[in-house]
Image (spheres, grey):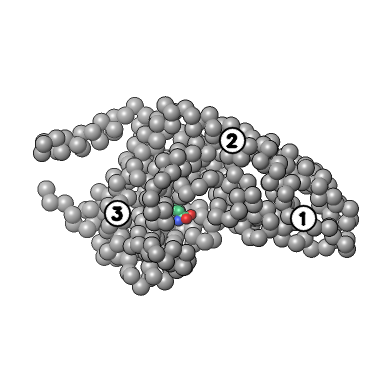
Amino acid sequence: MVSDLQDQPLTDFHYLRHPYLKPMQKKKEIVLSGIRPTGFVHLGNYFGAIMNWAKMQDEYDCYFCIVDWHSLTTHRNSHGLKENVLRLLSELIGSGLDPEKCVLYIQSDLPEIAELYLYLNMVSYKGELEKTTTFKDKVRQQPDNVNAGLLTYPVLQAADILIHRAVKVPVGKDQEQHIEMTRNFADRFNHYFGDVFPAPQAFNYGEELVKIMSLDGSGKMSKSENQMNAIYLADDDELIRKKIMKAKTDQGPEEPHSAKPDFIQGLFNLMQVVSPSDVLKKFEEDYNDCRIRYGDMKKQLAEDMVKFVGPIRSRSHAIRHDHKYMNEVIEYGAVKARASAKATLSLVREAIGIRYR
Ligand code: TRP
């Protein structure tokens, strides 16, 4: 039995000789981002994150991770987790992430992250974790499940980032505090044990980002609210049309060049990202001249949206049902990500002095 256990690393060794594994070129800056497998991907996720990740693949050495462990901090039972992870993976690829260009993998395939999380827990303090905005929000949202994983969520996120010694982390504004904490943990680690980690920075797309609003204009498009107010990559054509036709509008402007209410601006923003520019221009002009007909605008937007989402949905669907391909992608991502993670972890162990033979 004992020798069986000792044989286990050989399995890993076998992985290293996997025919897929090409030596990684580590010349470009390292980018990492993560996404939680907690529901359906909507247009806010797509235009706010995924599309931009896809653009970064050629320029950077990119790691994109499905963070299934993180989702356990809020979802006590793992019901639906597998389905969510697999659908998300297929939607990421369907949206343009290329498993040959970036390292696309699942967090729980890297036990190295859990080990680094353990070490980073020694350089993170209860006080700062309790002060984190996202933690305080979650305490309010789930008072009956304030588990230690929730408290140390930023430490696990730091481990995700630092395990590849990433320097750029493309995230939205709501994640900037976590990236700042990651920098602090990295700094402290370096201070106590020696220089291992570069300082990661949040990467902003800045001005270029078009705000994707909920279809009733009540803030950002998000997973949690009414499903009719968000458009998901998995929505079929009829559902997309229905959602857009039901989107909130009003009587239209009464004065030329009026400011737009949020729910109207939201529709224009959607048009900006999926419709041809002359179409957008026409409706902008109609609005400014007070002759806009929202029914026509929504019909046009619905058709352009169907044209945009349809191909992503069918690609994702085909990928999701090609089990052989899905398994290969998962394996390929895990092998490439582990090679990088192992290299970091051996530096970490060396720095701490955890090596006894
Ligand atoms: N906390 C991030 C979110 O809620 C997800 C995440 C986990 C992440 N690990 C990460 C993002 C590492 C960037 C880098 O969106």
Query: Mark 2 CB in 8 Å range of ligand 1?
Result: no
What kind of element bears circle 3? helix
- Pointers 2 and 3 in contact (CB under 8 A)? no
- The residue indicated by pointer 1 is 249
- Above or below, 131 against 77 in this view is below
- The residue indicated by pointer 3 is 116
Q: Residue at x 32, y 66 (%)?
A: 124
**How much space separates mark 1 and mark 3, taking CA atoms?**
50 Å
What kind of element bears circle 1? loop
Query: Mark 3 CB in 8 Å range of ligand 1?
Result: no
Q: Is residue 41 left or right of residue 341?
A: right
What mark, if any, has residue 313 been given in the picture?
2
Which is more N-terminal, label 3 or label 2? 3
Q: Residue at x 46, y 35 (%)?
A: 99
Mark 2 residue type: Arg
Which is more N-terminal, label 1 or label 2? 1
Q: Name the quarter showing ligand 1.
A: bottom left
Mark 3 residue type: Leu
Does residue 27 appear in the picture of this structure? no
